[in-house]
Amino acid sequence: PDGQEKGTLTGHSAAVNSVAFSPDSKFVASCSGDMFSDDNSVRIWEVATGKEVCSLKGHDCPVLSVAYSPDGKFVASASGDIYGNGGTNCVKIWNVETMEEKC
């Protein structure tokens, strides 16, 4: 390893709170949200190209954490009403193949 930056993924309009590599390291999931923006999203990025594959929206408050399932088929995202604005504290499960909320 040469210790050099391999690229920068841009697209969130709020603070990026967490990132996670897929089990095969081909994708990165990132999540965002803060009190100054309504970008409470999860984004999936292709590592090789740095391109955004999709933006998953459905949280109504900042998304604080994101993780892949061990088999890489699902992404879990956790949000919390850390500012006391009446948002929903929840975990959402996303199907990576269809990029839709599973439950």
Image (cartoon, helix red, strand yellow):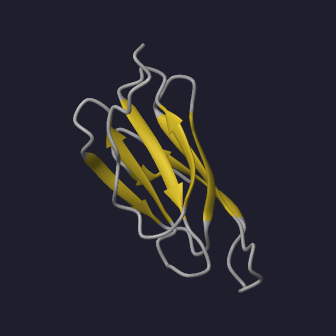
**Residue shown at the point (42%, 70%) measured from the top left:** 13
In screen coordinates, is 12 left or right of 61? left
Instruction: Reply above or below: 96 against 11.
Output: above
In screen coordinates, is 49 left or right of 83? left
The residue positioned farthest toward the bottom in the image shown: 85
- Percent across and percent down for residue 32 are 53, 61
- Quadrant assignment, res 48: top left
Instruction: Reply above or below: 79 against 51.
Output: below
Q: How many marks?
A: 0
- Quadrant assignment, res 68: top right
- Percent across and percent down for residue 16 are 53, 57
**Residue shown at the point (57%, 24%) measured from the top left:** 70
**Residue shown at the point (31%, 52%) measured from the top left:** 54
- Quadrant assignment, res 61: bottom right
- Percent across and percent down for residue 38 are 49, 78
Q: Quadrant of the C terminus?
A: bottom right
Instruction: Reply above or below: 28 against 17.
Output: above
**Residue shown at the point (52%, 55%) measured from the top left:** 31
Q: Quadrant of the N terminus?
A: top left
The residue nearer to you, when weighing 29 against 6, is 6
- Percent across and percent down for residue 7 are 32, 38
